[in-house]
Amino acid sequence: MNKLAVNLNVNGRNYDLSVASNKTLLEVLRDQLDLPDTKYGCGTGECGACTVLIDGQVVNSCLTLAATADGKAITTAIGLEKDGQLHPVQEAFVEETAVQCGYCIPGMVIKTVGLLEQSPEPNEAEIRHWLEGNICRCTGYEKIVAAVKSASKKMTNAGVKAVG
Amino acid sequence: MSTRILSDFNLLIPETVDEALDILDRLQDKVTVISGGTDVLVAMKFKFETENAMSVAKLPGMDGLSFDPDKGLRVGARTTIAQLLNFPEVKKYYPAIWEAAVTFATPQIRNTATLVGNLLRGSPAGDGSCAVYALGGSMVFASKSGEREVDIDDLWVGYATTARKPNELAVELRIPAPSAGNINAFKRLTRVNEDLAKLNVAVSMTMNGDVCEDARVVMGCVAATLVRLKQAEALLKGAEINDESLAKMMSAVEAEITPIDDQRSTAEYRKMVSGVIVKRTIEQARQRA
């Protein structure tokens, strides 16, 4: 094992860190930076609980070696809030009560932001195809899909971009 | 039971190709090359152990993706599945690759996994690999002694084993420009999209009206490597494509494959559906023409 120096910009804040070669980005976020909003689910890139944005792209942080994210900008669910205001996607999830146990929600919210960034007005088929790779064991997905639609409408009406 | 925690290894992140080639030359098969890492990191969380890993994350010149009407498609070693999906010439000239990309795992994996990595993994179930094998092409490897181009037909030498030498770095995939009259398509059978395929098929054919002048037919999940169905290809070549010739081709397919039972399907089922999936893939390609 070796340690590598990395610079990560996480939720707008710069961190100069020394990370172990075998640490995933997820482990560094949770254990080294004390940002537990990003969740560990399967550890193999199937459940999506660990989804973060790296330079605006949705990625499984459990399958990303932290050292290879050197110099990148990372956004986690908690970083979507701006000046005490929830992101419109977060608001939509609350308003549609798209949350039951909540474990998958940070990943779902980040995934939705990633979708609306590249496709601001997706239809339902597009939404469901995009949400593949994020598993929710409570909701049956109906309310999550409704929240994505509602967020899309809100943001289109307000002329807001997903990744601000 | 695995802990799903990565065991210790030494991580090298070279910033120049020369440096990367030096590392490979020095460590040979004691180093695992990581590009997207979506497959190898999962393997490392379970049973695969490696003393050293080398990431290509900081190597320059690996992100290329270009199309030239004469030279065809050039895909850099770090080009992701998502980048291929968003490249208009892929959808236009190589729909087989586009169709493999659109159902490739999940959006997160598509943003990370690379097509070159998919080929180098050497899985008999690789969707991207299946499409590329049908289209034909070559992989460019670099080493300290220069570059070597390996025809896609010679790339897979056994289960999860490729023709890459331990001191070589894959730098680019080259796929020829489509010939006049070329049609191609990809199709896969799964329970849900995120699953690996039970069976996948890609075809690339040169058509003159209804007559097939040349054909490459590839099937995955039915042998230790992806396989070209040579008998089916021979039956299609020179034939007018109609119900009769397709029926002949279908029975050849079933006889030509050697599938096994595994967690995703059975040998019996795979045999039973193999012919009709090839037929439907051909129909899918022809509908576009």
Image: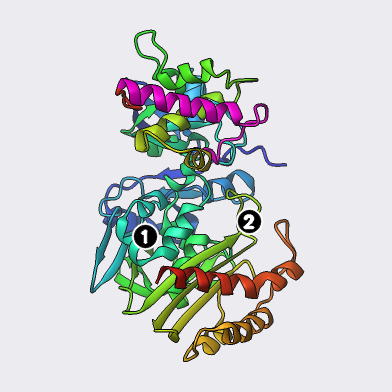
- B87 shown above or below A61: below
Mark nearer the N terminus (2 vs 1): 1
Instruction: Report the chain holding disc 1.
Output: B
Residue B121 shown left or right of residue A16 in the figure: right
Instruction: Report the chain holding disc 2.
Output: B
Instruction: Give how far across and how far down residue B54 sits, in percent.
Output: 41, 50
Q: Residue furthest bottom?
A: B238
Residue A132: say if magenta. Answer: yes
Residue B38: say if magenta. Answer: no
Q: Is residue A28 among what the camera can see?
A: no
Q: Which residues are magenta?
A: A131-158
Which residue type does callout 1 highlight? Lys
Which residue type does callout 2 highlight? Thr
- A116 shown above or below B153: above
Q: Main secondary structure of the magenta part?
A: helix
Badge 2: how crowded within 10 Å, few (<14), some, or many (20+)?
A: some
Q: Residue furthest top?
A: A84
Task: Residue under label 1, please give it.
Answer: B91
In three-dimensional space, the C-alpha distance between marks 2 and 1, rounded to whole angstroms, equals 22 Å
Of B277 and A60, the residue lying toward us: B277
Considering the numbered disc 2 on the image, is that residue within a helix, a strand or a loop? loop
Residue drawn at point x = 62 percent, y = 31 percent:
A136
